[in-house]
Image: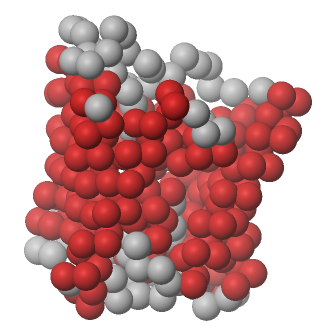
Amino acid sequence: MKKEFLSLFSGVIFSIGLIISGMINPNIVKGFLDIFGDWNYSLIFVMAGAIGVNVITFHLILKKKPLFSDSFNLPLKTQVDKNLIIGSMMFGAGWGIAGVCPGPAVVNVATFKVQILIFIAAMTIGMYLFKLVENKIS
Amino acid sequence: MELIIMPLIGGVLIGLSSTLMLFGLGKITGISGLYSSILTPSKENTWKYFFLLGLFLGGLVFNFLYPSKFFSYELVDSTWKIILAGLLVGFGTRLANGCTSGHGVCGISRVSIRSIIATITFIVTGVVIVAFEGVM
């Protein structure tokens, strides 16, 4: 239960962070990407705040052991491969079109707006399609 | 100011949340990965579902308390664009094994070359798409 409650609490904190920073607002996100137009640079400060904290804490934490687990469960791949590049381009394209990425999408589901529900349904399908071809690609 | 202070504070909260996940569970907070686990439901994934529930609950409470302050916006005005965007985000994040939280926040903080490259790639692509739409 400890892991579950810690996750729940972390999720709420993450959600609040996304909300008050404006990251759940697709117009603010697209504003950041609108470098050649009406540029909204606030996303830079969101990243600065998050990375600023984590650069210090991750470094310290990774020297020890997790509280409720025997070991760390970190991503294994270290090579930059074509899946990473193509996948990032696809994600970036979708992000640029709607201004929504997974985290804000889940937070926005709480508004029950039809547009958001359509987005997250499509996102889920996209993830499912990847699962179908995963073995052929990876 | 509003482009700096609240974004910074929000970012710090995002950092604290992912710090808590690493410290408590030893996991990276990559939301595309966490969300995709709903496609393969299992008891081991319960902590992931609780995190997603937390995201949702935060939205629920804030949308109830401050709907106009934080939630008054519309998505792009075209259903097919929303569907296309969703498909690209869904497939792309899985192919890249990460998104803005996984690669952008956590990966960069671990000084992962993969995440740095991924983040630059998806931001540049996003910029190109928005610029392209601006010209259309």
Rendered location of residue A4, percent (x, y): 32, 37
Rendered location of residue B129, percent (x, y): 63, 69
Q: Nearer the viewer, residue B38 or B8?
A: B38
> Residue at 22% across / 52% down in the picture?
A13
Residue at the far right in the pictured view? A136
Q: Is residue B51 visible?
A: yes
> Residue at 41% across / 51% down in the picture?
B52
Rendered location of residue B85, percent (x, y): 66, 68
The quadrant of the image that shows the N terminus of chain B is bottom left
The quadrant of the image that shows the C terminus of chain B is bottom right
Horizontally, residue A113 falls left or right of residue A93, namely: left
Rendered location of residue B9, percent (x, y): 14, 58
> Residue at 61% across / 71% down in the picture?
A119
Q: Is residue B98 visible?
A: no
- Please state the total of marks drawn on the protein image: 0
Q: Quadrant of residue A61?
A: top left
